[in-house]
Amino acid sequence: MASSPFHVLPPLAPRQALALRHFRGRRLADPESARIARLRHACEDMSFFAGPLGIIHRMKAAPIPEHDQQRLQALRDLLILDTPAEERFDKIVAFAAGEFDMPIALISLVDENRQWFKAKVGLAACETSRDISFCGHALESSDVLIVPDTHEDERFKDNPLVTGAPLIRFYAGAPLVLPSGHVAGTLCLIDQRPRSLDPLDLSILCALRDLVLDELVGEHRGA
Amino acid sequence: MAPDRNTKRFSLLLVEPYSVVRSTVTSVARSLDMVDIQDAPSIEAAAPLLSSRAFDGFVIALGDDRAGLELINRIRNGSTASPTTAVVAITTERMDPDSIAALKKLDVKRVLLKPFKVKTILETIAALAQPARHTEPS
C-alpha cells in the first residue's frame, strides 16, 4: 500500500459509497460488489470517506472489540444512553477541563454506531459516528489512551475530527471499565495543540474517571 | 513521590468541602502512596478523627466562619490528638493582611488561594511531608 494518506480512485457511485460506509458498520448493503470487495481486501480495516473526485482518506477506524455485543448490553443496562444532562457528571467534566486547561472534556459512551456524550465541555455536538471516534480506540484496554499529537499518529492524522472541527491535536481517554470488565467509554480530554501528561496528571485523570464510574455504577460496584 | 520503605509514613488530614477536589486528592495521594491520608468534608465531620488520631500534617479549607482558624489554634494548643508542631497548609477564597499575620502566628506553612488545581494541592502535600520523614530505627 502506498505511504500517502490519500489514494485517488475513480469516483464511487452513490450506491457503492453508501455500501462502503455500511461495511464499516458491518451492514454491507451490496456484498457482491466487485469494486467494494477489492477495496475491502486492499484496505483491510481502514476506514474510508469518499470525497470529491473519489479521494479516499485513509484512517484507522475505531476497532470493534471481540465481545462488543456483551459490552453494548452492559452499557445499555446502565440505562443512561440519551438521558438528559446531569449536574453530577457535568461538574466532573468541568473540573477536568479546568484542572488540565483543556478546551474540551467529555464523558463519551460508545454505542453500537456512535459515541454519545453524557457530559461535555467545549463541544456542541451530542454524538459522533463511532468509526471516527477516538474513544472507540480505548475500548480494548484498561490503560489511558494518550495521543500527544494526532498529526504524528497514523491512526488519527486523517481523521475527520482532526482535519476538520474540532481540529483535535491532543487526546487522552481514561476508559470507563464496568464491573463486567467491558469498557463503556471514556472520560476524555481534548486539545487543539499537542500536549503531554505527566504521571501525576495521569493519576488525577484516573481519579476523576473513578468518580465518573462511581456515579455510573457505584451502587453496583458496592454490592 | 512515594516514600522510601525505611521512612515513617506521613499522616495527613484533608478538610475540604468540595467533593470532587476532596475525592480526587485523596484518591491520587493513596494511589501514588504519597502519604497516609484521611479526609473530611468539614471540621465538624472531622471531629472524631481529630480526637482519635494523630496527624503529622493538615490541609484545611478555611471557610468564612473562622472554624478553620479555630481548628489550627486547637492543634497548636494541644487540644487534638495531633502534635502541636504538625505542619499546616490552608486553602481559602480570599486573604487579607490581618489574616496573613494571624496565619503566620499559627505557623501555617502554605496558603492556597482558590481557584487552584488539584495538582497544586498534591504538590503541597508532598512538600509538607518531605521534612517530617525520618528513618525509623532498624
Image (tube, coloured by chain):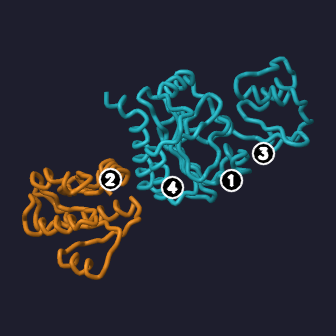
What SS does tag 4 mark? Answer: helix
Q: Which residue is denoted by mark 4 in the rendering?
A: A97
The label nearer to you, 3 versus 4, is 4
The label nearer to you, 3 versus 2, is 2
Whole-percent x, y for residue A8 in the image: 88, 41
Residue contact at pointers 1 and 2, CB within 8 angstroms: no
Type of the residue with mark 1? Leu
Query: Residue at the location (34% across, 72% down)?
Result: B94
Q: Which residue is denoted by mark 3 in the rendering?
A: A5
**Mark 3 residue crowding within 10 angstroms, few (<14) / some (14–19) / many (20+):** few
Q: Compute the Cα span from label 4 to label 2.
A: 17 Å
Q: Colour of chain A?
A: cyan
User: Is residue B109 placed above or below A64 in the rendered structure?
Assistant: below
Chain letter of disc 1 in the image: A
**Quick one: label 1 or label 4, which is nearer the N terminus?**
4
Chain represented in orange: B
User: Is residue A28 placed above or below A122 in the rendered structure?
Assistant: above
Query: Residue at the location (46% across, 54% down)?
Result: A95
Type of the residue with mark 4? Ala
Q: Residue A167 carries which label?
A: 1
Q: Do labels 3 and 4 share a chain?
A: yes
**Quick one: label 3 or label 1, which is nearer the N terminus?**
3
